[in-house]
Image (spheres, coloured by chain):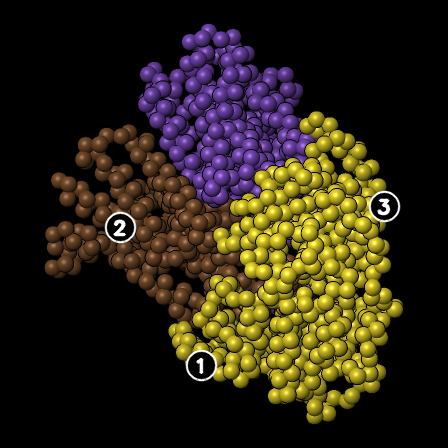
Chain colours: A brown, B purple, C yellow
Amino acid sequence: METAFIITILATAIQAGAPVIYAAVGEIFAERSGILNLGVEGMMLVGAVSGFIVAVNTGNPWAGVIAAMLAGGLLSLIHAFLTITLHADQVVSGLALTIFGAGLSSFLGQNYVGVQGPQFNPIHIPVLSDLPILGPILFDYDILVYLSVLLIPLSAYFIHHTRPGLHLRAVGEDPATADVMGINVARTRYIYTFVGGVLAGLGGATLSLAYTPGWTEGLSGGRGWIAIALVIFAFWEPWRAMVGAYLFGGVQALQFNLQTIGITIPTYFLNMLPYLFTILVLVFATGERMKRHLGAPAALGIPYIRGER
Amino acid sequence: MTPTPSSSSHRLPRLSLERRLTSPWWLSWVIPIASVALALLAGALIIASQGVNPWEAYRAMFEGAFGTGYGVAETLVKAIPLMLAGLGVSVAFRMKLWNIGAEGQLWMGAWAAAGVGLFLYPAWNLPPWLAILLMMAAAVVAGGLWGAIPGVLKGVLQVNEIITSLMLNYVAISWVLYFVDILWRDPGGLGFPNTAPLDKAIWLPKLTWIPFLPKGHRVHAGLLIAILAAVFIWFLLNRTKWGYEVRVIGENPEAARHAGMPIVRNIILVMILSGALAGLAGMAEMAGVAHRLQRGLSPGYGYTAIIVAWLAKLNPFGVLLVAVLFGGLLVAGDQIQLTMNLPRSISDILQGLILFFVLGGEIFGRYRLRLR
Amino acid sequence: MNTPTARQPDIAVEMRDIVKRFPGVVANDHVTFIALRGEIHALLGENGAGKSTLMNVLSGLYTPEEGEIFINGEKVVFHSPRDAIAAGVGMVHQHFRLVPTLTVIENVILGLDDPKFRLKLEGAREKIQSLSEQYGLKIDPDAFIWQLSVGEQQRVEIIKALYRGAQILILDEPTAVLTPQETEELFRTLRSMAEKGHTIIFISHKLDEVMAIADRVTVLRQGKVVATVAIDEVNKEKLAEMMVGRPVIFRIEKPEIEPGEEVLRVEDLHVRNDKGLPALQGVSFVVREHEIVGVAGVSGNGQTELAEALYGLRPVEKGRIFLYGRDITQASTRDIIREGVAQIPEDRHREGSVGNMGISENLIMKHYRRPPVSRGPLIDWGYVRDFARKLVKRFNIAAPSIHTKARLLSGGNLQKLILARELSSEPGLIIAMHPTQGLDVGATESVRKQLLEEREKGAGILLISEDLDEVMQLSDRILVIYEGQIMGETPGEGADRNEIGLMMAGENRSGTGDTSLQRNTSNA
């Protein structure tokens, strides 16, 4: 029964990690351009509920996915407009986005609680899915999970080996220089904040159309915040974000499966695990950063106003 | 010297922003008011999208909150925890510490106070006034400790306090619910998860002497505690050496370092103070309104407090005022649910919208819009 | 002044009647500026005269309110730096526009449309290497910017401009961060570029360099052009007078005073920088009463870390610091302040003041812990008001009221505020970091006068500055720091600029035999 337990944990970890991967990679893009978007939780919620509503009403989960991505993106544009064009404080704006997003998702989803909707089911790959051990761990997921895995190498390549990726890095590190070199700083930041919103929305859709599935108020349960913490843990690198997301997934998996191996801890304490885990991860990551003198994108969180100190 | 950007790098046609040197005094009033108005307008659109007449909805909300004596009383009741938690948040924000954990600190304060009230009071046979003081002390300590955790992590290890304080919210709620649902559950309860009620003697007394309010209102002594706290915080920040240090560190930590001010120590102290005030909010709500520890003790006061503090520009007396306004918003939310069957989440949406518009409007205090 | 007409073939740049305004000031007031092909043209003026602004207009960063620009006889309008680059104008800023975490190649190709999507760096690497050879600018294309020395970074900046086909190269105060030897090398590079037909525009406020390198000079003062002359028509004194508007005295009156007791003694100081690398490697020196000890050196050789260590802001790994004989090596900043040490920090805005607070609140930052500014836990704001008013008057700080926010003060007034705060407590030791950086002539004179006054009163002053002229003018003794070590010491009077320059570049010289200096050299 040991192996069965481990397999369950690993498989659940990868599934549970998927929505967080989307949100974290999205936030990596936004932060790499210099914009701190604390509204990830709000965008995930709005994405989740929009995706679900559209999927229920059209019968098509893919329509839901598109809707979720659009919703997250639109919401992120509010933050982008406030912080990039109006130079508002990025922390407060992000918080406002989360509160607004939470309220909006509640409002929109009030009639959809407990409703059954179309969902993404695990894809059965002949031969591979039936392998012992490796089958359930590697080949028993729905399309959204597979896409989340694909996202990692694609985004890493984009950031480090393409011209737009170079410009992205420059804007986040030294917007004054990027500006002088002819890169449109504001446009770059708008684009990548939008990308962050789109991916957060996709993460939400993964929750309401695959993982849970369904909609309840506050569906994401703080995953948006955990994603933000994981971005720091990841040193703004997609591969490390993946590791962090699966670690988080593993904690969630333990949370749900500890009693199967006879460990009884009241659910109240198990519920604390993901959040305590996040704090620990953050402490560890910050310590490592300090020692290795690695930094966040140097211009993160600072509004760029041409010509001002 | 600050230049006019040669071309707005965001291609806004012919509009550019020019930095002001000084801003006229009336601007700091006009902008927030205009922002709130715009937010209400945007909210109206959202309400209309659900097929409800927004003006009727707003009228119902306003009347519910401020139109009747009962409404005003309830507004004050809801304002009390917002005042205390808002004060706590504003102190932290003064030093640029983003304490998002006010909600958790509030819950921990309520829990500790409940522990004193439910068990120590009868066990040690304390006189009621002492019990109330001990409940307050317990709340302050519990909230303070809960705030100290992200404070220490930030001060000593430079760990981002936004996330740590926020994570602790979830931890705190789970912790308290464990007591509410299991350890301290009221056996005589009718299936609702809550603790036994506090002995009436140690409820925070109602302020029956306030004029113009209808009989049987629920406004309690927490209001006095909140007002005293505001005065105390104002005095602390503006008249004492420590308050001066806090303000300097918040404005420019590098200059503060060069002046020999202790940064780490102050980070921790400020977070403790911030948490303590939020904890006090929890105690006030528990001992003054609910009279027991229960689910739904706080509908997110800790989060709303952040908006309150920010809108009040971190001024202690401003916090009192804005807390009343937002108390009204919460009451209006309840009202609109009862009378028009619209969800309470409308008030969350409106809160978010108000914050957006005020945030957006802020820039006009620092910059002037120019058409070229 | 004779304005050549536009269509002459060898005019590379013509800026006609340029007006550029900012809130409260006209930075360029109907400026007409002409640079010829193949010449090195210096733009001279003191801080705030409008030189950088004019060149920012030429390089496309600012749009002028009035006026026109012609490049090679054709009218151009620049909406952004990109347009200027397309027209062949490249600018090397005083503060380099390089992203530290990217490599040389990545910085050079930043912002270009080619390569389209995938980053293929071989072509760029080849081109950079060929430019590097052509112009004698040695550089490793794959190095990260943070790994390079300041001189090397400047070379990257020049290559960046040449890579984009710059025919007209603008350099803003390029020698501020170079040793005298590196400056020579730069001048050689510039001359060879001019011979190849490039137009070099050289912004400076240093008269010696302008005299050495320029073919023609345009002098700006308070936003207006004073004159444009060929270099053989003028001398240093005439230029200085044009710059300032009145005859300028080049020597400061410095009375002879016998130095007194030891105020500061530093023994074998070892300190690490933020990256964990050694910043000070065995520094020893003394500062006495009535004495100004200058520390000369190119920035980045440990000066910042030295000032921080002396002020308790940076831990000392090895060695000792004594103040009036008392060991303060491990003392906190608070204690050091209490012992009577004042500091004029490197950055007035970041470290020296709180922009959003008023003058009076800034003035008490060092005094607030003790009476009479505070009584017990409370601050006596009434006393603070009087205190502030007195200081504003004594130090001549120009501001509408004592509640004016510090960020609204001019550089000179802000520095006066800092001086007022630091000097009002009659300090025994003053650590002054670049005290006149970015100030106009009037403010500079006033600051230097104040330092000399303190010297007369008996204070010991450690003057750390990259401005070699300033160090040479004010110091009684000059120490030269290089890579965290004191290379040697010379007396202030009659110091040899060349010798100092060599020490700044790393050549170890023996001291003058002064027994007050504890030497830590392993060789003779």
Q: CA–CA distance between discs 1 and 3? A: 62 Å
Give percent across and percent down for residue A31.
47, 56
Give percent across and percent down for residue C459.
77, 46
Give percent across and percent down for residue B233.
63, 30
> Residue at label 3?
C393
- For residue B116, side relative to residue C213 (left or right): left
Callouts 2 and 3 close, C-beta under 8 Å: no
Question: For the residues carrying marks 2 and 3, which lies nearer the camera in this image?
Answer: 3
Task: Return the residue nearer the eye: C67 or B51.
Answer: C67
Q: What residue type is labelled 3?
A: Lys
Question: For the residues carrying marks 1 and 2, which lies nearer the camera in this image?
Answer: 1
**Quarter that holds the N terminus of chain C:** bottom right
> Could you tell me if residue C380 is visible in this image?
no
Callouts 1 and 3 close, C-beta under 8 Å: no
Displayed quadrant of residue A123: bottom left
Mark 3 or mark 1, which is nearer the start of the sequence?
A: 1
Q: Residue C238's mark?
A: none
Give percent across and percent down for residue C251.
83, 64
Query: Quick one: label 1, few (<14), some, or many (20+) residues within 10 Å?
Result: few
